[in-house]
Image: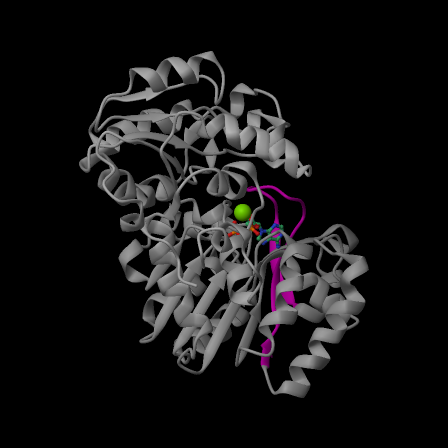
Amino acid sequence: MTLRTLDSLGDLAGRTVLIRCDFNVPLADGRIADEGRIVASLPTLRALLEQGAKVVAMSHLGRPKGEPDPQYSLAPVAERLGELLGAELAFAADTVGEDAHRVRIALEDGQLALLENLRFDPRETSKDATERATFAAELAAGADAFVSDGFGVVHREQASVFEIAQALPSAAGLLVQRELEVLSRLTESPERPYAVVLGGSKVSDKLGVIEHLLPRVDRLLIGGGMLFTFLAAKGLGVASSLLEQDQVERVRGYIADAEQRGVELLLPTDVVVAERFDADAEHETVAADAIESSRFGGSGIGLDIGPDTAAAFAEAIRGSRTVFWNGPMGVFEMDAFAAGTKAVAHALTETDGLAVVGGGDSAAAVRQLGFDDDAFGHISTGGGASLEFLEGSRLPGLEVLGW
Ligand code: ADP
Ligand code: MG
């Protein structure tokens, strides 16, 4: 089966088209900290609007608890999206209520509306498929077609991703199509050496990925929060750093597996340890096997890879022909702990081969650290989705589009 693309929907002039975007942008003090995901959604929106469709966009933002919560309103996104498109945009204060109805019936050909955060309704992410289907049917009412363009959510079985694609004629948008084209180059005969660099904070989520990646990669580089579970698996003390004690045994298995398969597993040899989790905290670099003997003793927290590690990682990355990177190497949001992430990002820009960055925070990090999007082969808008794709998992939001 092949992915259904926009042309499969026929002429959309005058039609009402629902589009699932991923406008889940990082916010800082109510402002958009990185608009990458909004920018990435523009080509499909423009294509639909230029065809003369009435376009109703929808997205989630953050993790509200199934009820309206002003801090997760999509209003700032609506404003920025209108500016970027240079067009008037109607914003509905709900998703399937009176305001959404009002906004939808007022739409003219070639006009765009954005609905409020989908996750203000508990049915969007309900575990009960019937509840999700009911919500999807309410969203679909009055629409002629559905376009799935939120790559960051295609691994989710959620109403606006999965059930809705069954309720209407549906197709992938240009962003989803492009993401798949690039990521497929990583799964179908990647040029070797093939390196995967993992970091970030969602330790247990990402540890699972390693099992699936080990048979595919030549090099695996581990930084970020998960590095401490690796150090612990090697019997080293990590003081008060992020540690998933219940995963240590499993990680020990990965280390053995990597060795057996001849996969080069690069673990940090030095770490930046801080007195506390704070931008101004006292800190020092220590060897990875001496974290507990930093001057902060048992209360020290590892917040970045050290300079020796950064140099070794950079060299391994530059010497690879295909590199996929997900997860910052340290707490890059704080200047004192951004060097490792910066070194890795820089090395990715220097590889001759294909360098792909995946993940919301990783993408935000490269931009925040001053790198140009074009310096990378591809910056994926999906973190979990791109990892699950690389693992070879089934992605419900793609299967439902014929993938
Ligand atoms: P992505 O969104 O790219 O998939 P994650 O959400 O998994 O990445 O992780 C990003 C977060 O990881 C950043 O906010 C960063 O501060 C945090 N992080 C990185 N290293 C550490 C560490 N050693 N301890 C705690 N948090 C860390
Ligand atoms: Mg993240």
Magenta-colored stretch includes residue 271? yes
Q: Quadrant of residue 323?
A: bottom left
Q: Nearer the viewer, residue 109 or 225?
A: 109
Indicate how the structure is coloured in the image: one colour
Q: Residue at x 47, y 32 (%)?
A: 28
Q: Quadrant of the C terminus?
A: bottom left
- Is residue 317 depicted above or below 371 in this figure? below
Left or right, 84 with respect to 98, comes to: left
Q: Nearer the viewer, residue 108 or 142?
A: 142
Q: Which residues are magenta?
A: 264-287
* Residue 392 visible in rendering: yes
* Residue 346 visible in rendering: no
Q: Residue at x 57, y 40 (%)?
A: 158
Q: Quadrant of the N terminus?
A: bottom left
Residue 276: percent from the left, percent from the top? 67, 45
Q: Quadrant of residue 286?
A: bottom right
Q: Nearer the viewer, residue 56 or 251?
A: 56
Residue 282: percent from the left, percent from the top? 61, 48
Q: Residue at x 55, y 52 (%)?
A: 396
Total numbered labels: 0
Residue 391: percent from the left, percent from the top? 56, 66
Magenta-colored stretch includes residue 281? yes
Residue 207: percent from the left, percent from the top? 66, 62
Q: Residue at x 54, y 40 (%)?
A: 163
